[in-house]
Amino acid sequence: MFFSPAESVIVGSDGDFYGTTEGTSTTTGAGTIYKMDPQTFALTVLYNFTNSGAMYPQGALLQGSDGNFYGSTSEFAYNFTASIFMLTPDGQVTILSQIPGQFSYVGQPLIQANDGNYYGSFGSSADKGFIFKMTPDHVITTIHTFKGRDGDHPNGLVQGPNGNLYGTTDYGGTAGNGVVFEISTDGSLFTVLHNFGDGNITHDGKNPVGSLVVGPDNFLYGTTYEGGIGGLGTVFKISPSR
């Protein structure tokens, strides 16, 4: 038996649902990766995480163009270090990277851009966070380092209609309440599109959460955890360019 599903499931190329759980009824209780048949609802455990390595998967999986699944965990052998993993369709897991620093995290979910590379964010309690690129050969490089005024603690990314990447940070910016940012896939362009709670827009919210989505109108949509007229959060819309 397993429990505590981690975020939403995805539909694999074979039509089955794939997801993760943070806990299991096994002695290690370190989480699982599973698939579910959408017709019979039969569940199959593809992988059991153990407390000697990557533990506690978080966020939704991503199936890459290579057919493999990519995701992250929040710990590695109880050392509070996050990791990025790859799961093959036959259930083999490879740890691709451990995130440096204690209490580290990976912004969810990873994405694969139209250039074939994978992109995501990570950070730890000792820094403001980073944006990274991972090649199809799993070589990871940092393309942006947050300093605080440009954002702090980034969430997941989305690729916009112009090919650039967009995301939010929980904190940082001019008012410390988070930002919406744009970054090119090579990291040469980085722009803060909006600072939440900086006084320029009344009740625009504070502390954005989750990934942005691109609407059919090519605008970006997202949510904030707090702020707004009632102080309980907002749904916002923003143009992908100034």
Image (cartoon, rainbow, N blue to C red):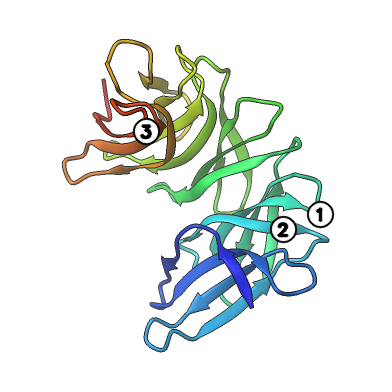
Badge 1 or badge 2: first in the primary sequence: 2
Q: Secondary structure at mark 1?
A: loop
**Marking on residue 55:** 2
**Residue that protrudes farthest toward the left in the picture:** 217
Query: Which is nearer the eye, 3 or 48?
Result: 3
| Label 3 element class | loop
Residue topped by disc 3: 232
Image coords of residue 131 (percent x, y): 54, 34
Task: Name above or below for residue 124 compared with residue 171.
Answer: below
Residue at 62% x, 51% y is 138
Q: Earlier in the sequence, mark 3 or mark 2?
A: 2
In the displayed structure, 145 sits above or below 115; it is: above
In the rendered view, does 138 fall on the left or right side of 206? right
Amino acid carrying mark 2 in the image: Met
Tally the numbered discs: 3
| Res 88 visible | no
**How busy is the neighbourhood of tag 1: few (under 14 within 10 Å), some, or many (20 plus)?**
some
Left or right: 43, with 113 as reference point = right
Quarter occupied by residue 142: top right
Residue reaching furthest to the bottom: 40
Find residue 152 and report its horizontal and vertical position in percent. Answer: 55, 25
Mark 3 or 1, closer to the camera: 3
* Residue bearing mark 1: 77
Mark 3 and mark 2: Cα distance apart in space? 33 Å
Quadrant in which residue 146 is drawn = top right
Picture residue at 78% right of the left edge, 68% below the top: 28
User: Is label 1 in contact with label 2 (beta carbons under 8 Å)?
Assistant: yes
- What amino acid is found at the position of numbered circle 3 in the picture? Leu
